[in-house]
Amino acid sequence: MKAKYFKDFIKFCSDSKAPLDFYSWHLYGRKNPYSIKEYAQVVRNQLDKYGFVNAESHITEINSNCGKDKDTGEIDSTFINTPKELHTLFPF
């Protein structure tokens, strides 16, 4: 997500009193699944800062490199538990 776009958009909505029911965002290329939760908190904090405390935050696309080393193509063993870790962060 482009941080400048996000902040400018939220500020514009706030300044112009435009309603904002939800903010949809994407996150790509993260190696650490816990960074998803951290970035979600950044989004929540910005929404709250500009008065959108009831606006929902939706991560609608996510991607990682699946734990493959870009040079060797071997799977990084730290990614074996990634689905389990994501479920722990975001239980469905």
Image (cartoon, rainbow, N blue to C red):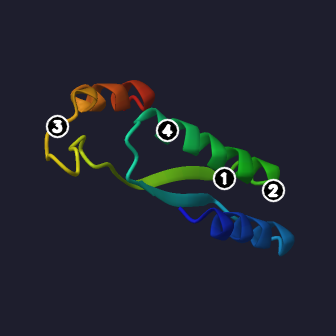
Secondary structure type for disc 3:
loop
Q: Residue at x 37, y 41 (%)?
A: 31
Asked which quadrant contains residue 66, the reply is top left
Question: Is 47 placed left or right of 17 in the picture?
Answer: left
Q: Nearer the viewer, residue 44 or 68?
A: 68
Q: Looking at the image, do the residues carrying marks 1 and 3 touch, with CB atoms under 8 Å apart?
A: no
Q: Mark 3 and mark 2: span between their CA atoms?
A: 42 Å
Q: Position of residue 54 (x, y in %)?
A: 70, 48
The residue located at (64%, 70%) in the rendering is 5
Residue at the extreme front of the image, as rendered: 71
Mark 4 or mark 2, earlier in chain: 4
Q: Where 25 falls versus 17 (above or below)? A: above
| Position above or below: 51 against 75 | below
Q: List x then y, in percent, for residue 16.
A: 83, 75
For the residue marked with disc 2, what is the amino acid?
Tyr
Q: Nearer the viewer, mark 1 or mark 4?
A: 4
Q: Quadrant of the C terminus?
A: top left
Which residue position holds label 1? 55
Q: CA distance from mark 1 to mark 3?
A: 38 Å
Whole-angstrom CA distance, mark 4 to mark 3, is 20 Å
Q: Amino acid at mark 3?
A: Ile
Callouts 2 and 1 close, C-beta under 8 Å = no
The alpha-carbon separation of the residues under discs 2 and 1 comes to: 11 Å
Residue where numbered disc 2 is placed: 50
